[in-house]
Image: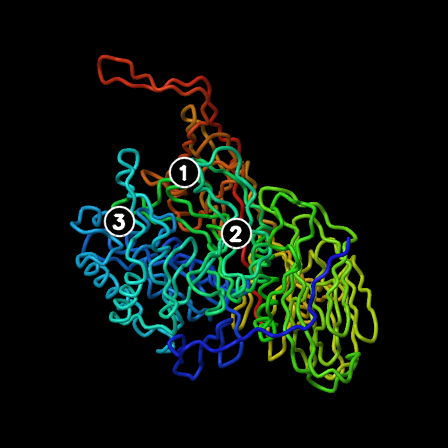
Amino acid sequence: MNHTVNLKNFSNKNIKPLSESFSGQSPDGEYLSFTNYYMEKNHKPFYPVSGECHYSRVHQSDWRDELMKMKQAGINTVSTYLFWNHHEEEEGSFCFEGRRDLRKFIEICASVGLYVIVRIGPFAHGEVRNGGLPDWLYGKPYEVRSLADGFLQCVTRLFAKYAEQMKGLYYKDGGPIIAAQIDNEYMHAGAPWEMTNGVSNEWVPAGTEQDAYMKKIKEIAVAAGIITPFYTATAWGGAYAPIDDMLPLWGGYPYRPWIFPNHKGPHPATEEYIYRDHHNNGIPATYNFEPRYQPEQVPYFCCEMGGGMMCSYLYRFQLPYESVDAMANIKLASGCNFLGYYMFKGGTNPLTLKGGFLNEGQVSKVSYDYQAAIGEFGQLRPSYHRLHRLHMLTESFAETLCKMKTVLPDGAEDIDPADLEQLRYSVRAAAFEKEGSGLFDGNQQQEKIVRGFLFLNNFQDHAVMKEKVKEAVCLSLDDQEICFDISLASGENAILPFNMDIDGILLKSATAQPLTVLKNQGQNIYVFFMPKGMKPVYEFAHKKVNAPDDRSSLFTMESLMGNTSILTLTQEDSMLVSKVTYRENEYLVLSEQTLLWEKDSVRIQSGTDSLKVVSYPDLAFLSEREESGFTQERDGIFEGCSFTGENADIKAADSLIMEQTGPTRYTIDFPKGFMDGKQEVLLRITYQGDIGHAFLGNRMISDQFNNNGAWEIGCKDIAKELEDEKLTICITPRKEGVVIEAETTMAGRFEKIESSVGVLEKAELVPVYEKVIRF
């Protein structure tokens, strides 16, 4: 089927600077600012990518490694909630120690090279008890989230403590903090007052005082010393975000546990995977985007795209990991110039200082894994690698991409989510002045050229899209028509370039997605990958190149740089890549293992004590190693090394002693030294039942609402305790025919159950090894 996008009489977006109140300069002269469409660094377009990581939900000993993983996935900004009740459980008594050490976390962000956005509240939500508000506020003679003097005095005290922790870490002082978010979802959402659950079921109010409240909270923050280049506010659902004071931020969640129990039946397919234009005054409101301002006044930025989702008691599911980068593709195509994921790094809820729980009632008490790109215990999910590919594109091509406006084909916004056959596509494009000598550009006289990207999405939540085969999309420009032959596997998405400048060579179209550009030995290497289902074809102005579709390959052409190479990766290889700078040259490194790059070494984390790392171009410190255990490797165009250790993998049957101690209760005895020689060990449990709970002594260390997936528990931080004391697994059984008998003259009640199941089926230890290769 043929499809078209009209790009005739194309005009660029009207881009203008925002006021200096949305700007800041660091002591070294770096300058951040904004236009009404994108962010700038040193007056050039900059594409921010933020990932949510809650420091108080991650053990402090893991902060650095997890932040390094985030950066290596292309995250350049960490956003984090400052949960009030994690710091001031008792009125006037503050805790900033251990995993609550806000200052230390931000210092580590700086050392890793990440910007920071602090979401200071006072209200947060984040599936935390009372939305983050301390219990003691419930009994006060004033309303929370209001302009009442008593509440504002508490906020003033809180912000003063935050400011004290963050002193010297703001961007203006040379620190990483570039923004502060004011409250969260004000006048859109509240949260249960947990102490009333099951009785009066009262809620923390959503607020009533509109912009006046938001402006007052910001005023208190600034007075406390929380001074950042810009401030933000969530704007979805009618939340108030006064745009003269703070940038409005948006998002989208296709998996929505909160709709239950009101919603009956299966979760419906949502409209999140339909292309739209969110920066167009001619379209003042669309699905999940109804701003209180003209869309083109400020940029369309996102801070909460579903980077995962927790299971609630009433909604259990396994996240399709391809849903995350499909969402990013949709937002990017729809005019978003700031991708932000909630969550990017899963975590574990801390306990109160007295051992109580700090979760919201609908979710697990301890685990906040969120099925995120980086799991609760550092596991890298497929979404991590899929997003990394996209972030390499936004980083490498930010200066052109940020200026490109959305152009939708007719009817794109009207596609029904239930329509699984219709091709979903959109374009972002901009007209650019021609540069260089016009070598091989096919049109020497043209002064401007429209360049851009064709976006394709073949994913739909809660449904399965049809594979797309033999489709065609044609872009109609003033002087030419550019056509793409499209085939795309179900569940996949793609971003394809047109009229791309490759060192003076005009790439009219390609059925391969741009990944990055390597600068090596004075030459450029443009890296692409094959979206699943596509054959990689490059249509240059002067010739056509069909790259192999069964392996990664390389070809070279004459260019303004002398020679320019095009590297095409398979879908599988594209999931293994890292971009590394070594001695002022850039390399593409491939490995199935997790690579953490230090200044003088790379730490390689693997599920076995064997590993393989290859690169292009050849990295000598990988391919020329002579130590015992290393073997040179050549894999097509890639060269490197492999390493085989002593094969010390844990055998589950030899390692754990399990004993059933009750109908649905078990103990697990860990062997001495089970952590020896390992960076981490995961306890992986499969079971039948409703909820799994893990107890060490009188402390719950993990829990899971059973979604028929593996339940994993990290052992590193509690290894000594596990060697000394048995772990208890308590399974809440899945029950049928439950009746509470209460017909009695006395206060006797009991549960009658027709049938139930709660069985621990398997428990095994999964090792994670670490090998260090020094440069």
Q: Position of residue 274 (x, y in %)?
A: 59, 53
Q: CA distance from mark 3 to mark 2?
A: 28 Å
Instruction: Work out whether 566 lies above or below 121.
Output: below
Looking at the image, tell me whether mark 3 or mark 2 is earlier in sequence order: 3
Q: Residue at (47%, 32%) from the top-left corner?
A: 658
- Closest to the observer, 557 or 202: 202
Instruction: Work out whether 211 lies above or below 400.
Output: above
Q: Residue at (20%, 58%) from the top-left corner?
A: 154
Q: In the figure, residue 119 lies in which quadrant?
A: bottom left
Are the residues tagged 2 and 1 within 8 Å (C-beta)?
no
Name the amino acid, label 2: Gln
Residue labelled with disc 1: 694
Q: Position of residue 699 (x, y in %)?
A: 33, 41
Looking at the image, tell me whether mark 2 or mark 1 is earlier in sequence order: 2
Q: Is residue 101 visible?
A: no
Few, some or many C-alpha atoms within 10 Å of disc 2 (few <14, some 14-19, many ≥20)? many
- The numbered mark at residue 379 is 2
- The numbered mark at residue 353 is 3
